[in-house]
Image (tube, grey):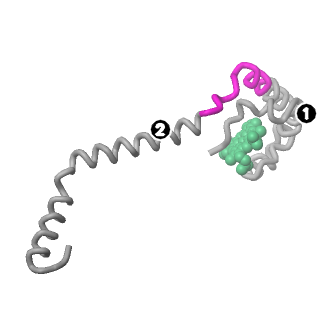
Amino acid sequence: MAPDLTQTYTKLGPEGTAAAMQTLFFPAMIPIYRNHQLIPQEQADLVAFFERSAAETKPEFPWTTEILILAAFVLAIIFVVITAFVWRKRLRSVRRELVATATRRGARP
Ligand code: HEM
């Protein structure tokens, strides 16, 4: 998947963006554009477009990754609690029976 280019202009600046449009020298794109360079009009249009997209959109909300990680942990805990509740009678009773039987037969608990 290719990266989100919304903030490309902020990252590369006016000259950087113009230079990038001239060569499109990015590993995945080299085979596609090596023999099909953008014409100056296309380059200028793309630079103008990137300039506008960078000005119109705010940078991404900074805590997205942290919130997702936290949400994953909270969900995991909720699932563990649900599992412990739904299957609360299962293994423990079996084990208690086994220990009781073994103890009756003389094994030390
Ligand atoms: C005129 C069309 C295109 C323009 C202006 C363009 C522009 C760019 C720019 C500026 C970057 C660098 C982003 C950065 O480092 O933050 C980039 C990277 C990338 N682009 Fe494009 N791109 C175009 C078409 C394509 C196409 C058609 C593909 C795939 C079929 C593609 C795949 C990628 C990939 C995978 C990267 C990540 C860097 C790499 O591994 O090369 N791009 N592109």
Question: Which residues are the magenta region?
Answer: 49-63
Q: Earlier in the sequence, mark 2 or mark 1?
A: 1
Residue in the image at 19% along x and 77% along y: 108
As displayed, is residue 87 above or below residue 46? below
Count how many numbered circles sit on residues in the image.
Answer: 2
| Quarter of the figure with residue 24 | top right
Is disc 2 in contact with disc 1, using a CB cutoff of under 8 Å?
A: no
The one of 3 and 59 positioned closer to us in this rendering: 59
Query: Which picture quadrant has residue 41?
Result: top right
Relative placement, left or right, of 63 versus 103 is right
Q: Residue furthest bottom?
A: 106
On screen, residue 52 above or below 82: above
Whether residue 12 sits left or right of residue 59 in the image: it is: right
The disc at residue 5 is none
Determine which of the numbered discs, if any, sits on residue 15 in the image: 1
Dot 2 corresponds to which residue?
71
Where is residue 39 shown, x and y percent of the image?
84, 34
Residue under the point 66% across and 43% down: 2
Q: Residue at x 21, y 50 (%)?
A: 88
* Label 1: element kind: helix
State the image coordinates of residue 52 (x, y, percent, origin top left).
Answer: 76, 21
Residue type at the position of mark 2: Ala
Q: Amino acid at mark 1?
A: Glu
Q: For the residue labelled by badge 2, is the local secondary structure a helix, a strand or a loop?
A: helix
* Disc 2 crowd, CA 10 A, few/some/many (<14, 14-19, 20+): few
Mark in front: 2 vs 1:
2
